[in-house]
Image: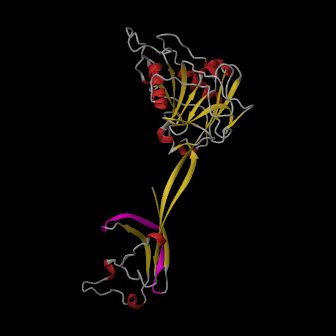
Amino acid sequence: MANSRIEYNTLEDIVDDTQQVITSTWTSNVNELKGTHTSSTQADFTSATSKGAFFIDVYNEATSSTNAAVQYSVAYGHKTGLGSKLFAQSDTAANSPSKVIYNQYRQLVFGDENKNFDFGNHTGNVVSDSYTPDDIYVINVNRSRYKNNLKPGTLNLKISGSGLGTLELTDDSVTNTGSAVPTNAGRQFHIVSGSSGVRLGDNTVQVTNSGSYGLYYPDSGFIILNPAAVDHSLTSLTPGITSDNADNNHQKLVTAISGGNSFILDSEEKISSKYYFTRIKNSQFNFTTNPSFIDNDGNLRFSTMENNPKVYITTVGLYSDSNELVAVAKLSQPIAKDFSKEALIRVKLDY
């Protein structure tokens, strides 16, 4: 129903707003991801070039379910390529899946394939030694699972295995009041023992002679775990580092996460909105343009509509300056309109 148009006043009728929306990272907004489900087709270790030799996808449900979706992937990287089969027996550079993974993530973080991960120095109130082991574990959250970024302070990951039993890991963003190291991959926090961004124990983040448990990159959606530190608590996560051998170290981490049976992580999104306050005066929009109300001579079919029109507003269309329809808003229920009524309709556009 429309027989005239309204021009919006930019200062009075249009309002911009931005909201921070926080939801669980996992499918269907499930708060806690329990256990792990993998695909035997994807987690194929038959050769050095198989997908499973590089990473293992973890699903929310058994892959036979129609609701199964990848939540995150687990990988293992080694600076010199140990723990994986070589791509070619004659390769003197020892190129292998583990070397590819290590190079990929240091390129993402440092923009340099010659720089190594350091699990020592950090932004807290303790300056520690530098710890640069040759290998890393990686948990990479599937890009479709989060919006703008993962939310610091919401990481709660339990991993379990032989040794001390269960290790509860979080980032140290709350303990360090949000202080982070800037990198090419965005903010960098340390992974520590604790929960919900709060470090457990004293003011250090290090495991003796090994550095922190890892590094957290919420803006890029991945976690780097330090095998040397994790190994102090869980000996079942000690990586195999033989040459030209599929030690499948990433499978060990998948098993440890499954044993912990608890992975909580939130994501956040900035939603920008524009509100259009559509003000309809009593003299406006009182007649319909529906062709069924007019006969062939252009007269109203129903004489009662001449002096006592009764119509309903159901839709608001937004047009550009060039008279192009760019958006349509549907009302939840029709609004009755006649000469004795006015209306204010708030149209919200999210982008």
In depth, the one of 180 and 242 nearer the eye is 180
Residue 211's image quarter?
Answer: top right
Query: What is the magenta segment's predominant secondary structure?
Result: strand
Q: Residue 328, how many percent across, how many down?
A: 40, 65
Give the vertical position of 351 relative to 90 (above or below). below
Question: Does residue 333 appear in the picture of this structure?
Answer: no
Count of residue discs: 0
Residue 178 lies in the magenta-colored region: no
Q: Residue 212, how many percent across, how many down?
A: 64, 26
Residue 331 lies in the magenta-colored region: yes
Judged left or right of residue 218, residue 318 is left
In depth, the one of 63 and 191 nearer the eye is 191
Q: Residue 297, how many percent across, how many down?
A: 24, 86
Residue 204's image quarter?
Answer: top right
Give the vertical position of 221 relative to 12 (above or below). above
What span is in magenta? Answer: 322-339
Give the vertical position of 4 relative to 58 (above or below). below
Q: Residue furthest right?
A: 201
Judged left or right of residue 346, residue 169 is right
Q: How is the image coloured?
A: secondary structure
Q: Residue furthest top?
A: 90
The N terminus, quarter of image: bottom left
In depth, the one of 351 and 33 nearer the eye is 351
Q: Residue 95, how many percent across, how many down?
A: 42, 16
In depth, the one of 336 and 16 nearer the eye is 16
Residue positioned 42% across, 86% down in the render: 309
The C terminus, quarter of image: bottom left
Question: Does residue 91 appear in the picture of this structure?
Answer: yes
